[in-house]
Image: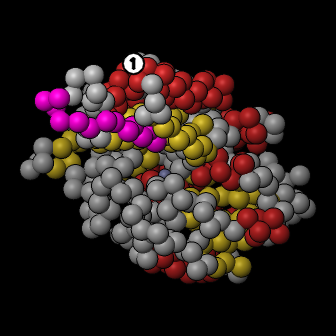
Amino acid sequence: MVNEQLKQRFLKYISFDTQSDDQSNTIPSTEKQKDLGRYLCEELKMLGVVESHMDEFGYVYGYIPSNCDSKNTIGLIAHIDTSDEASGKNVNPQIVKNYDGSTILLNKELNLSLNPEEFNYLKNQIGHELITTDGTTLLGADDKAGIAIIMTVVELLLNSNIPHPNIIVTFTPDEEIGRGTDAFNYKYYEEKGCKIAYTLDGGEPNVINYENFNAASCVVSILGKSIHPGSAKDKMVNASLVAIEFNDLLPKNMIPSMTEKYEGFNHLVEISGTVSSAQLFYIIRNHDMGIFKEQKAMFEKAAYELNEKYGYDLCNVVVKDSYYNMKEIVLKYPDVLKLVEEALIENNYVPKYEPIRGGTDGARLTFEGIITPNLGTGGQNYHGPFEYLDLDEASSMINVVISLLKKYNI
Ligand SMILES: [Zn+2]
């Protein structure tokens, strides 16, 4: 069943263009994110969340005190911004009621459609109400579906006497550019005694994420010896050719296009070079800390081998860690996951854990002492024109979240 308030909220939120920009150095990276932030802050106030505010960085916080004896404080987090991989301006949502399982045409001129043979998950969504794009933008379900779910949970709790713990609602900017927690108000969470939170930023309702990559970046600089090609014999060292050699020393199959699930990779993001110098830029990813360390060592080893071979320090490697897998920490607090499992089962879902092949704000929060797994929102195919939201699934996440919150009434 579709929750009409959630639907109206979602349609309103996606009318705001909140694209973030990784080229910008400000917080938030784009001022327009604050337009939605202000709106959300007002909405929280209107719903009766007396203690709500947006700070100078565009983070929106709302605090809802417990209406029972619960001493727990639980954070509910979603992000305001949308990906910079596709426009989020002038989103023109298409509503598909009672989906019949056929191909959904998104845009005739652009020849874009959602075909269940390509997007298999659609086969599970027959009879549901879906919201798609018109093929020219992304939809913004990532993560305005999360915001709409949280906001509707707040509304339902404040308009009923369902007992609940203390809740901090938080809407953050710049998640898509990896800066969603850069100006996070940890102090506020600490003051409220909040050590457990959930991001609502996933896909299928039954999927829980608490494992993400360990991540590092690596810059390889190569210094060649440039000499006139006519007299280069035994003298020239072509930095560009050494760059190719460097990459050849890394495992051939450990690249994004040949890995999935728990398999890590080294990803050559950028390469540039002349005869006299060359640079390679990689990102290194693995769920397993041990293998992650081995991967980083491979880069050092490749540089060492080349320096030995050419007889001078032509290759320099700088590896920098970016973030770590939150798994190790989350597993120390098994209830944080177990209670989600129970809430899902109560709502007729079969809980499933999936590793995130990327990072998450939850990982950073977890390392700062706020254990934060990620839950689904009913959105699919994020960051592009094929993005859509299943309104039935999003609506049922309202019940899952309320079931979950009730479990903290201890
Ligand atoms: Zn997201």
Residue shown at 65%/65% (left/top)?
Answer: 184
Q: In this view, does 212 lie to the left or right of 384?
A: right
Residue at horizontal 81 percent and vertical 36 percent from the top: 332
The range drawn in magenta is 219-231
Quadrant location of residue 232?
top left
In x, y percent, where is residue 17? Answer: 36, 69
User: Residue tagged by mark 1?
Assistant: 252
Q: Residue at x 60, y 37 (%)?
A: 214
> In the image, is 194 to the left or to the right of 48?
right
Which of the 4 quarters of the picture holds residue 81? Answer: bottom left
Q: x and y percent of residue 389 in the render?
A: 40, 49
- In the image, residue 352 lies at what x, y percent? 60, 30
Residue 100, can we see it? Answer: no
Q: Can residue 363 be seen in this view?
A: yes
Query: Quarter of the image holding residue 275?
Result: top left
Tell me: 134 left or right of 360.
left
x 71%, y 48%: residue: 366
Q: Find the residue positioned furthest to the front.
A: 231
